[in-house]
């Protein structure tokens, strides 16, 4: 009679189960049957809470008790209200096993290609859960390939995303199938969903990594664009074209993937670095941090290429986001020339004291690596580290300085005198 009060009670029960306070068998059964009576309610909020509760407690209740609600859920799955249909689908897949799946298979297949994005997405997500639940269920889901492929043409972006995810899962153990999937969608250019495109970029990268592992890429020192592998050429062309997409998410993912490709040549990575350099000047902290992280990783193997961004990196040393500032410092220490070390240390010293100890430790390790790269700068670098031993700082920070100085004394004998002083 009071839907709001019922919603509150169900929310409290869910809170108990989610905080580890499990109901006993008799309690769970009693509560479960009490909740199922609320299927008679027409209140949308209450019905959603009922679906959520059944989905959450289905695994703890007696399977024979749970099966009783199957008829109610099947009825909801065929009604005219999209909200009920979508939620009923999500709950049913938590209850049914491979033997029962045949009874509702027709409804799920119809829902996958439903005109409602909410229903279609729910069906695709449910199919994904079924695929992972057991080999028998996976065998049934594999038969829905036609419907799943059709769902990738949906105008709804989330439906495209979930359809791509399920398609890849179905074909993941078939390398030729994955290759055809990637080739089909990279050439057709039919995906409008940024999330689906991000998935396609990742699947393309996986394919290129497999090609490299089998020796089809980079063996002759050629770039991806000039590779003898048609898969490598087509895959790289798609990734490079994604750098010009209108959505930042897609552009970043393409740049990140290109920078992490195996057996790359400078001409392969340069377009990605140019895009990441633009992100360094973005007003969004997330864009600056994400591009900074990729460049910091790339600087370990390609410092000369990343050095083109040094001017922009220096501007980030004083960034309000300390994670960005720390990455900028550590990257500059890897990419700067020997002559620039003194100037860089002056910039770092002015606000290193503002950083938290966890960031200072990262900077200390980078300074140690710089000293190994440029041994002639040992006096300046060791002196810089020694000065910070006298400054305020926690145990881990001071310990990292001492450990770095001791390591340098072993690796670069010239530092012994200046270190002991």
Image (spheres, rainbow, N blue to C red):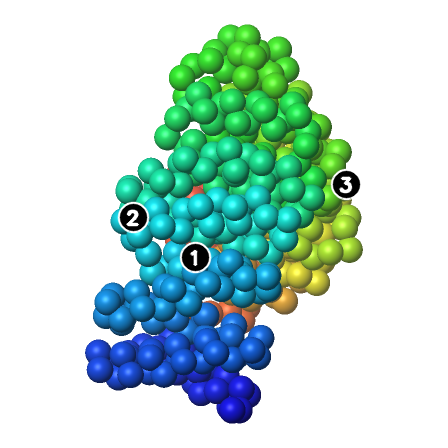
Determine the image quadrant of residue 221.
top right
Mark toward the viewer: 2 or 1: 2
Tally of numbered tags: 3
Determine the image quadrant of residue 54.
bottom left
> What distance separates the C-alpha of mark 3 from that of mark 1?
44 Å
> What distance separates the C-alpha of mark 3 from that of mark 2?
43 Å
> What distance separates the C-alpha of mark 2 from that of mark 1?
56 Å
Name the residue: 44% across, 87% down. 9
Q: Which mark is residue 400?
A: 1
Q: Which mark is residue 246?
A: 3
Please say if the residues under marks 2 and 1 sit with CB atoms less than 8 Å apart. no
Name the residue: 44% across, 46% down. 106
Residue 83 x/y as whole percent: 58, 65
Q: Which mark sits nearer the N-terminus, 2 or 1?
A: 2
**As rendered, which of 364 and 93 lies closer to the eye?**
93
Q: Is residue 409 left or right of residue 386?
A: left
Specify few, some or many for label 3: CA neighbours under 10 Å numbering under 14, 14-19, or 20 or more.
Answer: few
**As rendered, which of 183 and 56 lies closer to the eye?**
56
From the viewer's perspective, is residue 57 above or below residue 303? below
Mark toward the viewer: 3 or 1: 3
Q: Which mark sits nearer the N-terminus, 3 or 1?
A: 3
From the viewer's perspective, is residue 156 above or below residue 152? below
Q: Secondary structure at mark 2?
A: helix
**As rendered, which of 36 and 273 lies closer to the eye?**
36
Q: Which mark is residue 98?
A: 2
Mark toward the viewer: 3 or 2: 2
Q: Secondary structure at mark 3?
A: loop
Please say if the residues under marks 3 and 1 sit with CB atoms less than 8 Å apart. no
Q: Is residue 115 in view?
A: yes
Residue 119 x/y as whole percent: 57, 55
Name the residue: 59% across, 61% down. 80
């Amino acid at each position: 009679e009071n839907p709001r009060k019922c919603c509150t009670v169900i929310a409290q029960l869910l809170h108990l189960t989610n905080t580890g306070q499990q109901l006993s068998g008799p309690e769970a059964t009693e509560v479960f049957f009490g909740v199922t009576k609320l299927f008679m309610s027409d209140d949308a909020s209450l019905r959603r809470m009922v679906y959520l509760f059944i989905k959450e407690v289905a695994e703890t209740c007696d399977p024979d008790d749970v099966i009783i609600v199957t008829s109610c859920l099947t009825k909801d799955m065929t009604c005219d209200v999209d909200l009920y249909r979508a939620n009923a689908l999500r709950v049913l897949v938590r209850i049914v096993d491979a033997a029962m799946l045949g009874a509702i298979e027709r409804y799920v297949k119809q829902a996958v290609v439903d005109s409602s994005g909410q229903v279609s997405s729910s069906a695709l997500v449910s199919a994904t859960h079924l695929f992972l639940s057991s080999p028998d269920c996976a065998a049934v889901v594999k038969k829905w390939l036609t419907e799943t492929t059709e769902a990738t043409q949906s105008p709804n972006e989330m439906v495209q995303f979930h359809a791509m995810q399920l398609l890849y899962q179905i074909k993941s153990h078939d390398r030729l199938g994955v290759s055809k999937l990637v080739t089909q969608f990279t050439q057709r250019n039919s995906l409008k969903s940024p999330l689906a495109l991000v998935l396609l970029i990742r699947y393309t990268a996986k394919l290129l990594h497999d090609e490299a592992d089998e020796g089809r890429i980079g063996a002759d020192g050629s770039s991806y664009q000039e590779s003898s592998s048609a898969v490598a050429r087509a895959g790289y062309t798609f990734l490079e074209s994604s750098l010009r997409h209108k959505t930042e998410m897609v552009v970043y993912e393409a740049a990140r993937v290109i920078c992490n490709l195996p057996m790359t040549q400078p001409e392969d990575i340069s377009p990605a670095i140019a895009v990441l350099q633009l992100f360094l000047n973005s007003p969004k902290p997330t864009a600056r941090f994400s591009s900074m992280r990729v460049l910091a990783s790339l600087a370990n193997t390609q410092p000369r290429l990343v050095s083109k961004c040094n001017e922009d990196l220096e501007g980030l040393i004083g960034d309000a986001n300390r994670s960005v500032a720390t990455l900028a410092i550590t990257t500059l220490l890897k990419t700067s020339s020997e002559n620039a070390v003194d100037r860089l240390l002056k910039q770092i010293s002015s606000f290193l004291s503002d950083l938290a100890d966890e960031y200072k430790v990262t900077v200390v390790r980078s300074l140690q690596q710089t000293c190994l790269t440029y041994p002639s700068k040992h006096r300046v670098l060791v002196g810089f580290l020694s000065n910070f031993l006298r400054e305020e700082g926690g145990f881990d920070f001071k310990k990292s300085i001492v450990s770095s100085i001791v390591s340098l004394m072993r690796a670069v004998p010239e530092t012994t005198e200046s270190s002991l002083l």
